[in-house]
Amino acid sequence: LAKTTQPISMDSYEGQEVNITCSHNNIATNDYITWYQQFPSQGPRFIIQGYKTKVTNEVASLFIPADRKSSTLSLPRVSLSDTAVYYCLVAPGNRKLIWGLGTSLAVNP
Amino acid sequence: DAGVTQSPTHLIKTRGQQVTLRCSPKSGHDTVSWYQQALGQGPQFIFQYYEEEERQRGNFPDRFSGHQFPNYSSELNVNALLLGDSALYLCASSSTGGGDEKLFFGSGTQLSVL
C-alpha cells in the first residue's frame, strides 16, 4: 500500500483558502486518493476522492497532477468549524487502509 | 436514513475483562471495518468483514475477534483486556464493489481499561 506524507499541522484564519498537500510517491495504477476529516471524539468523515486531474464537490477541491505522486486538498474560505484533522489515504479500495497522523488544521478568528 | 451506529458510546473495564462492541452499518452497506484509534494517532485497521467472514486483518493479536451477522451488523470482541487497549474504537461501513469504496464511520466507542 502506498505511503503518504503530509504536514503535521497548519494554521489559517477565517475566510482564507487552505491547501494541504499530500505526497504519495509510490502510488499504484489502481489506487484512489481519498481525504477524510475528523473532529475530536468523532469518526472520520469522507471529504473527497479522486483518481486524476481535478475533482470538486460542495465542500472541497482535490488537485492531482499528471504523475499522481502528490495531491492537494483545497478548502475554500475556511471557518472555525473547519478546525479538524485531515487524513490523506491512497489505496485501491478500503481494505486495510494505512492511516498516518494526518494534518491538524487550526483555523483562527 | 440512519448512518453507522455504534454502541455503547463509552465503556469502562478493568484489566483481564472481556468486552463486546457493536456496530450497525449504514443502510445498503454490506461491509464493516473496525479500527482502533489511540489518542493523538490515526486510526489503525483491525479487520474487515464481508459476507459474514473476516476478509482482511491488521496487526492485532488473536484477543481481538469479530463477527458479522446476516443483517450485516457486526461485533468486535476483545478478550483479556490490557491497559493499552484503551482507545476509541471505530466502525466503518461501505459497499463492496468498485475501487472507490468510501468509508462511512460511526462516532465510535470510547473504551477505558483501568
Image (spheres, coloured by chain):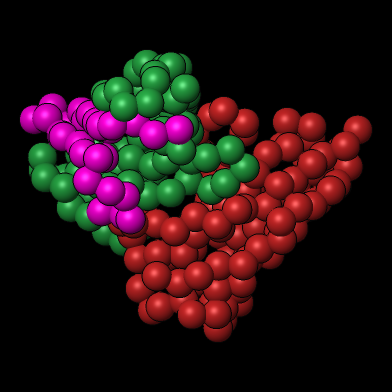
Most foreground residue, B3 or A56: B3
Residue B56 included in the magenta stretch of the image: no
Region of the chain picked out in magenta, as a range: B57-83
Is residue B2 something that shows in the picture?
Answer: no
The N terminus of chain B sits in image quarter? top left
Q: Nearer the viewer, residue B91 or B88?
A: B88
Percent of width and height locating residue A74: 70, 55
Residue A47, image x and y in percent?
55, 46
Tell me which residue sits at (57%, 28%) in the image. Answer: A41
Placement of A38 over or under A101, stated as above or below:
above
The image shows residue A31 at horizontal and vertical percentages of 40, 70
- Chain B, colour shown: green
Total number of numbered labels? 0
- For the point 25% across and 53% down, the residue is B57
Residue at 35% over, 18% down: B7
Q: Is residue A48 visible?
A: yes
Residue at the far front: name it. B16
The red chain is A
**x, y percentage for residue B64?**
26, 40
Name the residue nearer the viewer: A7 or B79. Answer: B79
Taking the spot 44% from the left edge, 25% from the top edge, the residue there is B113
In the rendered view, tell whether residue A42 sits above or below residue B98: above
State the residue in front, A11 or A47. A11
Give the quadrant of residue B68.
Answer: top left
Q: Is residue A65 above or below residue A59?
A: below
Q: Is residue A48 left or right of residue A40?
A: left
